[in-house]
Image (cartoon, rainbow, N blue to C red):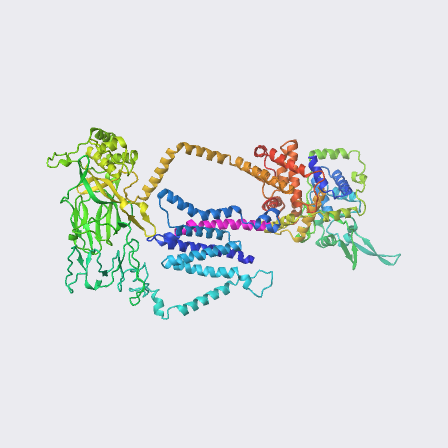
Amino acid sequence: MRKADDLVTSDSSLLIETEQGLIEGIRSTLNGALRGKTAVNEFVLACLLARGHLLVEDLPGLGKTTVAKALAQAVGGKFARVQCTPDLLPGDITGFRIFDQRTREFEFLPGPVFADVLLADEINRATPRTQSALLEAMAEQQVTIDNVRHVLSPTFFVIATQNPVEQHGTYPLPEAQLDRFAMKLRIGYPEKEDERAMLAAAVGASRDEAEERGPQVGPGELQALQDRVARVSVGSLLRNYLVDLAHATRSHRQVALGVSPRGLLTWQRLAQARALLQGRDYATPDDVQDMASPVLEVRLGIEPEATGRVIEEILASVPVPVLR
Amino acid sequence: MADVGDRSVRRLTLAMIALATTALELALAEPGRPQWLCVVTTLSLLVAPALALAWFVGRRLRISRRDADRGLPITSKIKDTPQASLILLIVALFLLPFVGEVAQFALWGRGVMLEVVLLAALRNLGLGLAVLADRTTFAKLGALISIFLVLVAASLGEGALIIGFIGVYAVAATFWLMLLYWNDIALSVDEGRSKPLPWSAALWVLAIVSLGGVAAVGPTRAATALAGLVPTSGGTDWNDPDARGGVNDGDHEVSASENPQSVGYTQSEVYLDSDRPSLYDTFNDMYGEPFKIKKSERMIALPSNGVQEQKERPVENLQAGREFPLVRRKPDQPARRPGHRAAKALFYLKGPTPVHMRMATYARFDGKAWSEQPANDLMPPLDKEKQGAWFRLVHFSPPVYRGGLSHQIKIGLLDSDALPVPAQLVRFRVGSVDRPDFFGWSQGGILRMVGRTVPAGTVIETESQVVDPTLLAQIELPSLPVPARRNDDPSDQYVVTPEVAELGKTWVSGRSRGWKQVEAVVDRLRTEYRLDREATSSDAPGVDPVSDFLLRSHRGADYQFASAAVVLLRSLGYPARVVSGFYAEPRRYDVRTRHTSVLREDVHFWAEVQVSMGSWATIEPSPGYHVLGPAPTLVERLARVLAFFGRWGRDHRNALGLCLVLAVAALWYRREWLDGIATLVWRWNSWGAWRWRVLATLSLVERRSRWAGRPRPPGKTPVRWYGPIAKGAAGETRDDMDRLVRLADWILYAPEDARMAPTWSEHDVRSMCRRVVRDWTLGRFRASAMSPPR
């Protein structure tokens, strides 16, 4: 196996060693914070590198906030958290201008969206108005307050969470807005072994491990990584495969809403990110298939229990371009 | 050619070839075969397979186009080259009729006309090309062939159905031309856009042109036009002088009632007076009886309006197949006369063969020579039927007949007063001769003309019965009367030698008396003795030729077979006789004239066994000659085929068993030997670029995985499928598979400018491929007993 790995890493020798180091740093921070959830962490990492936003839907206490915080720590940016409630106003998220008595001028107080990593907890409890303010910020990477345009951080990354159990008094995100998220994840309960390790690590630990480690990437380095992802090669075979898959989602009888062109672009970018995470500078059908589940889950608009089966059907219906 | 037109051109080419094929088959069909049957056979045996193949090829083409659109590197190379297997198939189809012809010659001794074989080959080629018509060249070639076939059909065929097919063909061909050249003739449409086909416009044009055509050349009166559609008692007034079908034959073909210039096998009402012997006389009351001094032969009179005086001597046309003289000129311009065509055979036979035709029967045997049976008075009287000149033989017929035969016998060079007719005659007609006193019986029930020879050019029509051996076996055969010692007839004093009599008894031992015993004797003779026309029996005194043949030489001419059969049968107590005559051999059937020639060489001896008073059944002791049995029913045919295969299987049981075992083994181990072939091919192609080498190896791995019952689902990537399978293996083997899959990924999906891994030389990759092929055998795939990876 080692030789094969040599081959793979060395054929992507165009990668700078430090890039791998950076990725490894973020990865280990995430893995340290959320134990036994390597796959989830990989998705989170891919989403970050693909400049996408993440929607996590799971029960309370499974580590949504932990992941967000660890990510913020690792990226080395500013972390902000908004607990969404029905009385949350758009200004509470975007920021607002107040009159400064001393300078006799209006001063802009930036809201939590000006952070590098924003955790919007229980986003479906906010009113649609507030939701759309946040989603506009996610899509445009900017907010406009009183006709003044404020650019957000170039590595602005939103992790929104939803509680799937309590639906009372919530405002479910409409399909159009769900499309703004790159992917939807479920974290799930950890394995027994991991829980034991977690408990053992918690004894005597005064501070967060992630906090201890400190930032893993310097300023601008994350952006460079994201640019690097954009340059990962996608061959014509793979493009055709992606298009076929998108068409397959649109023609599947159980799918109300197929993948939009924006969704398809996101899918390609996520596949590129995964390729880079795997140490390759070209994407393969495996990357596309790996990313299919989180990408499609947020877009297909079908009942959660049927999603897995439908995605499997769609993947099985399109032949992988190999040697036909 | 436009993409829109592609499929339509393909379909139209196929349709044209199908129409041309059907028209051709209709034109070439044997006369008398129902046309619908011909159409159905053609459609099911020729057109339907072509359509199926076309569908199959079209499907493959669509798939490969789709792959090409995706930019698959391998299939895009294949896209434009037609598959070698298909080309081979077309060549094979083209050659098949020739092979069939050769096989027919080898098996039955006669084939069909070379033209028909060539047409069949062309037709096959056309069908094959139409299947591949997605390439313009093939479509054009196919259409060209279809035009040729249609022309042939139009010139050979007759009947409304063919005209209909040709009409539809014309419409299809028009559309075909339009489609093919549409892009060139369409003028003002944007470049690059596929131009829509003007179907409606084309239909309009077709309708207008058809109407115009009808108006221009069609009938001017509505009544005339309607005459073709509305059934009337008189039919239409359409008349074709060269017609060979329909109500009556055309004037040129039949009657030559105006100005006949040749004599032949004529059944027309006009008779030309020539100095050839004839059944007809120009005797006429008005002119008085012509006085022929030299020779008097009996003739019958014809009415005066059917006779024409002619100064010139008419030429003869006595070859079969040309029943009627073709006189194409008007009487006022007799530029060319028909050529003189003498008969080449004794007579020509139209009808089923083989036929035995008696010319003489021999009843008495003195040990050396057979003498003719004396004429007796027990022959059936001839009963003339009320209509026409048919005579019916009135005699008791035993219940041994099944089915009837009708023949036409056209006398050529035969110079005899005996009429060559099939043995079990029921009724007959000789031209217009309607007087029973023209016919009589010579010895042994041979029908003959009284007082004259049968002249050349006479057409004898006969209807006869067929003896069914199974029915014969059910009746009791008469016994030979106890040989009354007739002292006045010393020739009948032949005594069968004890050895021969013993031989006969041995042959029939175990069989009950009756036809079975006769068959036993005949079978022995046919199987254990050799026919040798040159063989003569010893001339030494005291040597009995029959005993000599039966006991010593075991070879002889047909008369020896016949004599031996008769002697043996008589020794067993059956009345039998030797017959000489003509044997109409199926081998001499001429497909062009559809007649069987009977030549001088067809003189033959056979034997007959008495079934009842006055009726004799033909037996054929000579090997190589056959007696025509009744047409088998469907059940009999099936039973015969089954019996044949059963016998064949029994005779070849060892070879058959071996083949069966081999076939089962080949089927059982089909994956193994397919894998062997695939591996050989892989080895053979080992000199390609290393990238192709890797992909070829992966493809071989995929094949093996499929043959091992573990095919990679199309939606699974090789990594996801072979990774878990490889996990079951150990060490190097597992790593090799892993590397192969990853390397293939890299080749397929990495950008073009990516360089090869520095740690991997080309040599390394090649040896890795070899290791994978060596290690990941079919057996390993089978043995990787694991639930299919998810």
Q: Quadrant of residue B466?
A: top left
- Left or right: A4 with respect to B482? right
- Left or right: A89 with respect to B493? right
Q: Which quarter of the rendered picture does the C terminus of chain B lie within?
A: top right
Q: Which quarter of the rendered picture does the N terminus of chain B lie within?
A: bottom right
B175 or B556, which lies in front? B556
Q: Is residue A62 visible?
A: no
- Left or right: B747 with respect to B707? right
Report x, y in % for residue B169: 44, 59
Q: Which residue ends up furthest to the right in the rendered image?
A: A102
Was residue B412 drawn as part of the magenta stretch in this picture?
no
B183 or B684, which lies in front? B684
Was residue B48 drawn as part of the magenta stretch in this picture?
yes
Magenta span: B40-67
Magenta stretch, main secondary structure class:
helix
Q: Which residue ends up furthest to the bottom in the rendered image?
A: B220
Q: Is residue B36 visible?
A: yes
B704 to B220, vertically: above or below: above
The total of numbered circles placed on residues is 0
Report x, y in % for residue B720: 63, 40
Report x, y in % for residue B67: 59, 49
Report x, y in % for residue B188: 58, 66
B376 or A152, which lies in front? B376
